[in-house]
Structure formats: structure tokens, C-alpha cells
């Protein structure tokens, strides 16, 4: 049965090595250290931008490697993008409403 | 795909569609994104309205505990991801060990959270506490959001522990194997989402002072 499946599947299961995962983990730890270090510096408006920027990079690492988004069929990435854009529209519309009250 | 389903039916095999199963999990995760996303919007609006009071309230946070919990969740994401590689290679014991480590790290996160909340309660910073109500409106809002958002996240961690415990049991009983491990993949996807939510909660609540 397993053989039949691989025969018909367009993408055979992608195995990520331990080394690749550990590399992403080390990178995420480094980014965590960076976000804590940067928080002590008074950057004014840039505080929130750097914090969310670093969080977004960490999220992309988790999505692409840990959650295998990079190795899935394209439709998975399209779905994820649609979900992210939907949330972004909610945020932008909320702030338009809030700013012009 | 149609050919594939047909072949499976003719041969009397049960139909299996791992890609479809994973997609179902992703769709569920998008509903979680909207659930937490709505809360992040509420946070953003209130913080926009009370920037100084949010910064003042955040000074009550212990950055060390927050950073420690971030490291714990990141490491648990690593172990559950590695457990998939292990099961793909047919290393059942290694896979079970890695899932067990994930469960232990999840429990460690909850223990930290318990002591953290306990300390807040001790100093009178719990919802509707007289000490908290005597503070400025922005600080009250901050702590309201803190309890709701980290509380809902902690609930997800607790559910994750249940899911991972089931997965551990299923690997042990050979219901999850090197040729059929989509349940481990789906459980891992859920666990990574819990990690991602915390990646945003940590800077927004602990690092704004």
C-alpha cells in the first residue's frame, strides 16, 4: 500500500535532517537574544517595529522549516498567504476606523 | 488524485490522503490565527490609546521568566519537529523520546506560568483587585489583556500536552509508524502554532518598557 502511494504522490515526503532543524533552532535563539538586547535600547518608535520584525523573521523560520511549508505543495503557501493578508486587512481597516473617529 | 482514490477502492484498501489531512490541520490553524489575531488587534488599539500606561504596566513583567519560556517553547518546537524525522527513519524509540521531551518542556512552560501568575496575584495584580483598580485605565487594560491572551495561550499549551500524550501513546501502540505518521505531523503543526503565538506575545507584553 505504501508503495502504491508513493507511486501516485506528486511529492514524496520530504525528510528534514536533524542538523537543519538544529540550525533553525540556534538561529531562533539568536533572534530571541537580539530582541531582548534591543529592548533595553531606547529607539522610540522603532522599538515596536524591530520587535515585530524580529518576531516575523522567527515566525517565517518556524513556518518554512519546522512546519514544512517550504516543502509542501504550492497551494499550502497560497492558503497561508491569503490568511496572513486577511489578518493584515483586518488590522489596517481597524486602524483606519480608529484614526478617523 | 482521482486515479489514486479509485485504485485504493478497487484493491479494498482504506482511502488515505495525507496531504489532505495536513491541509485540514492548516485550515484549522488559520481559524486560530483569526482568534488570536482579533486579540492582537484589541491590544494594538488600546496600546495606541495608552502608550505610556502600557509601558508602565509592562515594568511589572519579569523579562527573564518570559525569555526562559520563549527558549522552552522554541526548544519544544525543535524536539517535536525532530520526532517526525525520527519516525520517517523508522526510529520509534527516538521519536517517542523526542515527543516525551516536548511534553516535559510544555509542562515546564506551564509551571513557569503558574509561578508567574501566582506572583502577580500576590502583589495584587489580578483582575478586579483593589490594588490594580487604583491604577490608571491603561494599566488595568494591559493586565486584562495579559490575563486573557496569555491565559488562552496557556490553555492551548494544555491542549497541546493532551494531543502530544495521545501521539506518544499511538506511536507506542504502532498506530503511528514510519509509513503512516500524518497524525504526528498534524499534532506537530498545532504545537508549532502555539510556539508562533508566544513569539508575538513575548515582545508585546515583556519587552515594551
Image (cartoon, rainbow, N blue to C red):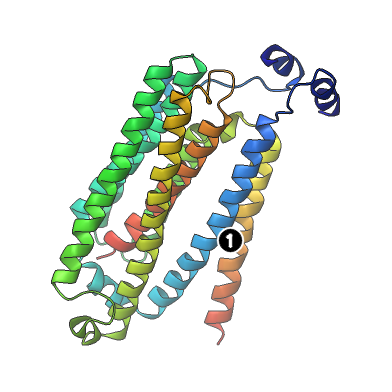
Picture residue at 31% right of the left edge, 66% below the top: A44
Q: Is residue A50 left or right of residue A2?
A: left
Most foreground residue, A77 or B51: A77
In this view of the protein, which residue sits in the foreground, B199 or A32?
B199
Above or below A93: residue B105: above
Residue at point 56% right, 74% down? A94
Residue topped by disc 1: A88
Residue B163 vs B39, above or below: the answer is above
Q: Quadrant of the N terminus of chain B?
A: top right
A36 left or right of A90 in image? left
Crowding at mark 1 (Cα within 10 Å: few <14, some 14-19, many 20+):
few
The residue lying at 50 percent from left, 21 percent from top is B174
User: For residue A17, what is the image quadrant?
Assistant: top left
Chain identity of mark 1: A
Residue A83: image x %, image y %?
A: 62, 53
Task: Indicate left or right for B7 with B26 as reference.
Answer: right
The image quadrant of residue A7 is top right
The quarter of the picture where residue B148 lies is bottom left
x, y percentage for residue B142? 32, 73
Say left or right for A34 vs A19: left
- Is residue B137 among what the camera can see? yes
Q: Position of residue A78 (x, y in %)?
A: 68, 44
Callout 1: helix, strand or loop? helix
Q: Is residue A45 above or below residue B185?
A: below
| Residue B60 image position (x, y, % from top left) | 19, 67
Amino acid at each position: 500500500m505504501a508503495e502504491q502511494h508513493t507511486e501516485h504522490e506528486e511529492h514524496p515526503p520530504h525528510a528534514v535532517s536533524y542538523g537543519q532543524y538544529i540550525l533553525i533552532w540556534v538561529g531562533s535563539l539568536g533572534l530571541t537574544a537580539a530582541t531582548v538586547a534591543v529592548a533595553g535600547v531606547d529607539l522610540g518608535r522603532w522599538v515596536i517595529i524591530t520587535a515585530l520584525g524580529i518576531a516575523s523573521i522567527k515566525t517565517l523560520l518556524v513556518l518554512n522549516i519546522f512546519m514544512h511549508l517550504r516543502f509542501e505543495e504550492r497551494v499550502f503557501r497560497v492558503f497561508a498567504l491569503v490568511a496572513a493578508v486577511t489578518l493584515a486587512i483586518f488590522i489596517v481597516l481597524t486602524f483606519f476606523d480608529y484614526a478617523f473617529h | 488524485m482521482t486515479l489514486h482514490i479509485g485504485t485504493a477502492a478497487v484493491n479494498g484498501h482504506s482511502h488515505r490522503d495525507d496531504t489532505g489531512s495536513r491541509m485540514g490541520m492548516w485550515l484549522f490553524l488559520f481559524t486560530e490565527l483569526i482568534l488570536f489575531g482579533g486579540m492582537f488587534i484589541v491590544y494594538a488599539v488600546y496600546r495606541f490609546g495608552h502608550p505610556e500606561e502600557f509601558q508602565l504596566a509592562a515594568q511589572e513583567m519579569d523579562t527573564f521568566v518570559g525569555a526562559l519560556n520563549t527558549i522552552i517553547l522554541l526548544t519544544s518546537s525543535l524536539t517535536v519537529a525532530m520526532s517526525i524525522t525520527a519516525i520517517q527513519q523508522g526510529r520509534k524509540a527516538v521519536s517517542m523520546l523526542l515527543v516525551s521531551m516536548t511534553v516535559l518542556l510544555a509542562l515546564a512552560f506551564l509551571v513557569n506560568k503558574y509561578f508567574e501568575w501566582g506572583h502577580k496575584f500576590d502583589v495584587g495584580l489580578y483582575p478586579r483587585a483593589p490594588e490594580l483598580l487604583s491604577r490608571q485605565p491603561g494599566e488595568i487594560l494591559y493586565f486584562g489583556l495579559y490575563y486573557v491572551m496569555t491565559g488562552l495561550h496557556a490553555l492551548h499549551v494544555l491542549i497541546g500536552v493532551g494531543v502530544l500524550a495521545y501521539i506518544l501513546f499511538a506511536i507506542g501502540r504502532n498506530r503511528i509508524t514510519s509509513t503512516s505518521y500524518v497524525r504526528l505531523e498534524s499534532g506537530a503543526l498545532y504545537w508549532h502554532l502555539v510556539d508562533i503565538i508566544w513569539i508575538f506575545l513575548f515582545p508585546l507584553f515583556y519587552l515594551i518598557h
